[in-house]
Image (cartoon, grey):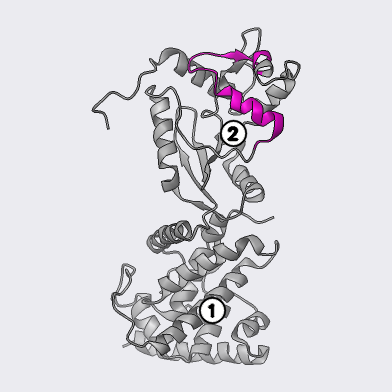
């Protein structure tokens, strides 16, 4: 892939024995960098992806907690670039910080979890949108609420459109359940992850028995 | 606007490793790389957007190598545990035997000038800044270094 740095012809192939890319060393050094950065407290944003029934999700966390979940259709690279701008460019692929998040999401998608017990970093949301998102957590697993009802619950019954915007720009979809907000006429309404993802989540919650992980299962 | 640092590692990590290996050899290269990227990550938010990131990294690597060199000079018995080494170690024709033997025999500045010019493609004006000498001296160091390297290495390889 990286052909730019081949030994220049001037060097007459002297450096041919020195690998242009040494995958094994790169992996080892990357792990070491992540560990050292975390220890030094300069790993501002850690991220990984997780394969789920709604496609690969990007998960990103600061030292305060989970800060962003993004669907593939939102463009993971663009989302990371935006995090670099809004939070910090000190961003590394560092799955370990997201172990608990990945585990809870896996359990949720398997139908074994009906609520998330995760530290959230709300710094990407402000004002009325933040209020709306915090109210979404009151909509129970398996049920839905209308945009109008959420507007009323957030203290501004006329702000139905603003609720729609808050849901559409939810930085923590799935965990903050904007998929449970539907139109008053019973139709689904839009979704950041696309209508199919919203349908998948609503169907999962309507059909999966919301049981805790059975005892004895790791 | 600065990219996520992960992209910097992916784009420039392999080249900086090559430079560390060519300048410092198999035992010290990975420590130098690690210190370079940790220091770079620390300073990264203050990097002026649009900077030549590769030249910036090589400059940091150069300083880290100097630090290691000075530390060793102060404390020459500091080598206890060798770091993990790449596979292919000791295999004839792999870089950490014959090529490194040849590189190691060059004066340090020539080795650096050769690596920065031939592996990274930095212009001599920039290499002069890093080496703290003149552009003409940097050009001469690279030219003398590559000539000597070809002579020694070829000779060794044909044995």
Q: Is residue A145 above or below residue B27?
A: above
Residue at image coords 60%, 27%: A134
- Image mark for residue A25: none
Q: Mark 2: which secondary structure?
A: helix
- Residue B120 visible to the viewer: no
* Image quadrant where residue A197 sits: top right
Magenta stretch encompasses residue A126: yes
Q: Which residues are magenta?
A: A125-150
Q: Nearer the viewer, residue B67 or B128?
A: B67
Q: Residue furthest front?
A: A155
Relative placement, left or right, of B78 versus A149 is: left
The correct choice, above or below, for B76 with respect to A165 in the image is below
Q: What subunit carries mark 1?
A: B
Residue A37, horizontal then vertical, whole percent: 48, 59
On screen, residue B60 versus residue B83, left or right, reads: right
> What subunit carries mark 2?
A
Which residue bears the numbered disc 2? A73
The quarter of the rendered structure image containing the N terminus of chain B is bottom right
Q: Residue A212: image x %, image y %?
A: 35, 22
Residue tagged 1: B62
Q: Is residue A191 left or right of residue A54?
A: right
Q: Quadrant of residue A10?
A: bottom right
Report the residue at 57% width, 70% height from top: B57
Of badges 2 and 1, the one in the foreground is: 1
Under circle 1, the secondary element is helix
């Amino acid at each position: 892939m990286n052909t730019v740095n081949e030994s220049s012809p001037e060097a007459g192939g002297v450096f041919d024995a020195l690998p242009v890319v040494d995958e094994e060393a790169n992996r080892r050094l990357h792990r070491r960098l992540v560990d050292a950065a975390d220890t030094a407290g300069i790993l501002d944003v850690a991220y990984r992806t997780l394969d789920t029934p709604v496609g690969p999700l990007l998960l990103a966390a600061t030292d305060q907690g989970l800060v962003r979940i993004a669907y593939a259709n939102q463009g993971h690279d663009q989302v990371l670039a935006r995090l670099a701008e809004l939070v910090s460019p000190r961003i590394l692929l560092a799955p370990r910080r997201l172990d608990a998040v990945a585990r809870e999401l896996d359990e949720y998608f398997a139908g074994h979890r009906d609520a998330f017990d995760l530290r959230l970093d709300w710094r990407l949301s402000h004002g009325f949108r933040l209020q709306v998102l915090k109210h979404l957590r009151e909509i129970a697993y398996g049920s839905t609420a209308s945009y109008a009802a959420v507007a009323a619950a957030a203290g501004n019954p006329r702000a139905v459109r603003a609720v729609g915007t808050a849901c559409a720009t939810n930085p923590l979809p799935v965990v903050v359940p904007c998929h449970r907000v539907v139109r008053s006429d019973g139709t689904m309404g839009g979704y950041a992850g696309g209508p199919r993802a919203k349908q998948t989540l609503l169907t999962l919650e309507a059909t999966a028995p919301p049981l805790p992980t059975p005892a004895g299962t790791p | 606007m600065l990219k996520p640092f992960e992209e910097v590692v992916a784009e420039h990590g392999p080249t900086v490793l090559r430079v560390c290996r060519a300048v410092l050899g198999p035992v010290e290269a990975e420590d130098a790389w690690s210190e370079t990227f940790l220091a770079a990550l620390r300073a990264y938010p203050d990097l002026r957007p649009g900077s030549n990131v590769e030249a910036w990294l090589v400059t940091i690597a150069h300083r880290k190598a100097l630090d290691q060199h000075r530390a060793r000079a102060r404390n020459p018995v500091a080598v206890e545990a060798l770091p993990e080494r790449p596979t292919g170690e000791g295999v004839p024709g792999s870089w950490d035997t014959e090529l490194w033997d040849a590189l190691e025999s060059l004066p340090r500045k020539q080795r650096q000038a050769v690596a920065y010019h031939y592996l990274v493609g930095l212009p001599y004006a920039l290499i002069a800044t890093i080496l703290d000498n003149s552009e003409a001296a940097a050009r001469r160091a690279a030219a003398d270094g590559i000539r000597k390297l070809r002579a020694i290495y070829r000779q060794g390889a044909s044995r």
